[in-house]
Image (cartoon, rainbow, N blue to C red):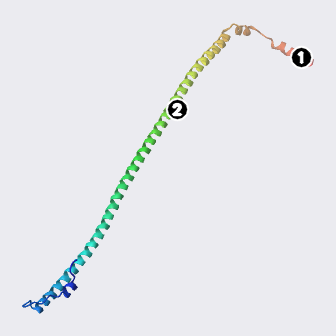
Amino acid sequence: MPLTPLDIHNKEFNKGFRGYDEDEVNEFLDQVIKDYELVLREKKEMEERLNEMKERLGHFTNIEETLHKSIIIAQEAGEEVKRNAQKEAKLIIKEAEKNADRIVNESLSKARKIALEIEDLKKQSKVFRTRFKMLIEAQLDMLNTDDWDHLLEYEVDATELKIHEEEDSLA
Protein backbone atom coordinates (compact mmCIF):
# COMPACT_ATOMS: atom_id res chain seq x y z
CA MET A 1 0.00 0.00 0.00
CA PRO A 2 1.46 3.41 -0.97
CA LEU A 3 2.47 5.99 1.57
CA THR A 4 0.20 8.91 2.28
CA PRO A 5 1.42 12.38 3.26
CA LEU A 6 0.01 11.69 6.73
CA ASP A 7 2.20 8.54 6.99
CA ILE A 8 5.23 10.61 6.12
CA HIS A 9 4.26 13.33 8.60
CA ASN A 10 3.72 10.88 11.47
CA LYS A 11 6.85 8.87 10.78
CA GLU A 12 9.23 8.95 13.71
CA PHE A 13 12.81 7.86 13.56
CA ASN A 14 14.83 6.34 16.29
CA LYS A 15 17.38 8.65 17.73
CA GLY A 16 20.88 7.52 17.75
CA PHE A 17 24.18 8.86 18.75
CA ARG A 18 25.35 11.36 16.37
CA GLY A 19 22.25 10.95 14.24
CA TYR A 20 20.88 13.37 11.72
CA ASP A 21 19.96 16.90 12.64
CA GLU A 22 16.31 16.68 13.65
CA ASP A 23 15.35 20.10 12.27
CA GLU A 24 16.94 19.33 8.93
CA VAL A 25 15.18 15.99 8.74
CA ASN A 26 11.83 17.59 9.68
CA GLU A 27 12.35 20.33 7.15
CA PHE A 28 13.20 17.78 4.50
CA LEU A 29 10.20 15.66 5.46
CA ASP A 30 7.94 18.73 5.26
CA GLN A 31 9.26 19.37 1.76
CA VAL A 32 8.73 15.71 0.84
CA ILE A 33 5.16 15.89 2.24
CA LYS A 34 4.38 18.98 0.14
CA ASP A 35 5.89 17.46 -3.00
CA TYR A 36 4.19 14.12 -2.35
CA GLU A 37 0.81 15.86 -1.80
CA LEU A 38 1.36 17.76 -5.03
CA VAL A 39 2.19 14.52 -6.88
CA LEU A 40 -0.87 12.81 -5.38
CA ARG A 41 -3.09 15.76 -6.33
CA GLU A 42 -1.68 15.77 -9.85
CA LYS A 43 -2.15 12.01 -10.01
CA LYS A 44 -5.77 12.37 -8.88
CA GLU A 45 -6.35 15.15 -11.43
CA MET A 46 -4.76 13.02 -14.14
CA GLU A 47 -6.95 10.06 -13.16
CA GLU A 48 -10.01 12.31 -13.26
CA ARG A 49 -8.96 13.66 -16.66
CA LEU A 50 -8.26 10.12 -17.82
CA ASN A 51 -11.71 9.01 -16.66
CA GLU A 52 -13.23 12.05 -18.32
CA MET A 53 -11.33 11.26 -21.53
CA LYS A 54 -12.43 7.62 -21.31
CA GLU A 55 -16.04 8.77 -20.95
CA ARG A 56 -15.67 11.10 -23.92
CA LEU A 57 -13.95 8.36 -25.89
CA GLY A 58 -16.79 6.00 -24.94
CA HIS A 59 -19.29 8.63 -26.04
CA PHE A 60 -17.52 9.12 -29.36
CA THR A 61 -17.18 5.36 -29.77
CA ASN A 62 -20.93 5.07 -29.25
CA ILE A 63 -21.50 7.81 -31.80
CA GLU A 64 -19.15 6.05 -34.21
CA GLU A 65 -20.96 2.74 -33.71
CA THR A 66 -24.32 4.45 -34.14
CA LEU A 67 -23.13 6.16 -37.32
CA HIS A 68 -21.70 2.89 -38.60
CA LYS A 69 -25.00 1.12 -37.91
CA SER A 70 -26.90 4.01 -39.51
CA ILE A 71 -24.73 3.80 -42.61
CA ILE A 72 -25.28 0.05 -42.83
CA ILE A 73 -29.04 0.51 -42.36
CA ALA A 74 -29.07 3.28 -44.99
CA GLN A 75 -27.12 1.07 -47.39
CA GLU A 76 -29.51 -1.82 -46.78
CA ALA A 77 -32.50 0.48 -47.22
CA GLY A 78 -30.96 1.83 -50.42
CA GLU A 79 -30.41 -1.69 -51.70
CA GLU A 80 -33.99 -2.61 -50.76
CA VAL A 81 -35.32 0.47 -52.57
CA LYS A 82 -33.18 -0.42 -55.57
CA ARG A 83 -34.42 -4.04 -55.56
CA ASN A 84 -38.03 -2.89 -55.22
CA ALA A 85 -37.57 -0.37 -58.04
CA GLN A 86 -36.08 -3.08 -60.25
CA LYS A 87 -38.97 -5.44 -59.43
CA GLU A 88 -41.47 -2.68 -60.14
CA ALA A 89 -39.71 -1.82 -63.39
CA LYS A 90 -39.82 -5.49 -64.45
CA LEU A 91 -43.54 -5.64 -63.62
CA ILE A 92 -44.19 -2.45 -65.57
CA ILE A 93 -42.25 -3.83 -68.53
CA LYS A 94 -44.15 -7.14 -68.38
CA GLU A 95 -47.46 -5.30 -68.19
CA ALA A 96 -46.44 -3.04 -71.09
CA GLU A 97 -45.40 -6.09 -73.13
CA LYS A 98 -48.73 -7.79 -72.36
CA ASN A 99 -50.61 -4.64 -73.37
CA ALA A 100 -48.51 -4.33 -76.52
CA ASP A 101 -49.18 -7.98 -77.39
CA ARG A 102 -52.88 -7.49 -76.73
CA ILE A 103 -52.97 -4.34 -78.86
CA VAL A 104 -51.06 -6.05 -81.68
CA ASN A 105 -53.34 -9.09 -81.51
CA GLU A 106 -56.43 -6.90 -81.47
CA SER A 107 -55.07 -4.90 -84.41
CA LEU A 108 -54.30 -8.07 -86.37
CA SER A 109 -57.76 -9.41 -85.59
CA LYS A 110 -59.36 -6.14 -86.73
CA ALA A 111 -57.19 -6.11 -89.85
CA ARG A 112 -58.26 -9.70 -90.66
CA LYS A 113 -61.89 -8.78 -90.03
CA ILE A 114 -61.60 -5.72 -92.28
CA ALA A 115 -59.85 -7.79 -94.96
CA LEU A 116 -62.70 -10.34 -94.82
CA GLU A 117 -65.24 -7.53 -95.00
CA ILE A 118 -63.42 -6.07 -98.02
CA GLU A 119 -63.43 -9.45 -99.74
CA ASP A 120 -67.12 -9.83 -98.95
CA LEU A 121 -67.83 -6.33 -100.32
CA LYS A 122 -65.85 -7.15 -103.48
CA LYS A 123 -67.95 -10.28 -103.96
CA GLN A 124 -71.15 -8.35 -103.29
CA SER A 125 -70.08 -5.61 -105.73
CA LYS A 126 -69.35 -8.24 -108.41
CA VAL A 127 -72.76 -9.82 -107.83
CA PHE A 128 -74.43 -6.39 -107.88
CA ARG A 129 -72.56 -5.40 -111.03
CA THR A 130 -73.48 -8.63 -112.74
CA ARG A 131 -77.15 -8.30 -111.75
CA PHE A 132 -77.23 -4.62 -112.70
CA LYS A 133 -75.58 -5.41 -116.02
CA MET A 134 -78.14 -8.16 -116.62
CA LEU A 135 -80.97 -5.78 -115.70
CA ILE A 136 -79.68 -3.09 -118.08
CA GLU A 137 -79.17 -5.66 -120.83
CA ALA A 138 -82.70 -6.95 -120.29
CA GLN A 139 -84.02 -3.39 -120.50
CA LEU A 140 -81.96 -2.78 -123.66
CA ASP A 141 -83.31 -5.99 -125.11
CA MET A 142 -86.80 -4.76 -124.34
CA LEU A 143 -86.03 -1.44 -126.04
CA ASN A 144 -84.57 -3.18 -129.04
CA THR A 145 -87.61 -5.41 -129.64
CA ASP A 146 -89.99 -4.84 -132.51
CA ASP A 147 -92.88 -4.41 -130.13
CA TRP A 148 -92.14 -0.69 -129.93
CA ASP A 149 -92.37 -0.38 -133.67
CA HIS A 150 -95.78 -2.11 -133.69
CA LEU A 151 -97.12 0.35 -131.15
CA LEU A 152 -96.25 3.24 -133.42
CA GLU A 153 -98.16 1.62 -136.28
CA TYR A 154 -101.47 1.77 -134.48
CA GLU A 155 -103.59 4.73 -135.33
CA VAL A 156 -106.45 5.63 -133.18
CA ASP A 157 -109.10 8.12 -134.20
CA ALA A 158 -109.61 10.59 -131.39
CA THR A 159 -113.19 11.32 -132.46
CA GLU A 160 -114.16 7.71 -131.90
CA LEU A 161 -112.75 7.88 -128.41
CA LYS A 162 -114.82 10.95 -127.61
CA ILE A 163 -117.98 9.22 -128.72
CA HIS A 164 -117.20 6.20 -126.58
CA GLU A 165 -116.52 8.44 -123.64
CA GLU A 166 -119.82 10.26 -123.99
CA GLU A 167 -121.74 6.99 -124.27
CA ASP A 168 -120.06 5.69 -121.14
CA SER A 169 -120.83 8.84 -119.19
CA LEU A 170 -124.55 8.76 -120.19
CA ALA A 171 -125.04 5.23 -119.23
Q: Which residue is mark 1?
A: 168
Mark 1, Cα crowd under 10 Å, few <14 / some 14-19 / many 20+, is few
Sequence-first disc among 2 and 1: 2
Furthest residue toward right: 171
Judge from the rendering whether residue 99 lies leftward or rightward of residue 30; answer left or right.
right
Q: Residues within 10 Å of mark 2 (few under 14, many from 20)?
A: few
Q: Position of residue 68 (x, y in %)?
A: 33, 58
Q: Is residue 41 left or right of residue 155?
A: left
Q: Nearer the viewer, residue 47 or 148?
A: 47
Kind of residue sitting beneath label 2:
Glu
Q: Nearer the viewer, residue 49 or 82?
A: 49
**Cα gap from disc 2 to disc 1, whole angstroms:** 76 Å
Callout 2: SS: helix
The quarter of the displayed image where residue 164 is located: top right
Percent x, y of residue 170: 92, 18
> Is 104 located above or below residue 39 in the figure?
above
Q: Position of residue 148 (x, y in %)?
A: 70, 10
Say if 155 sits above or below 66 in the image: above
| Marking on residue 106 | 2
Above or below, 91 relative to 113: below
Q: Secondary structure at mark 1?
A: helix
Q: Amino acid at mark 1?
A: Asp
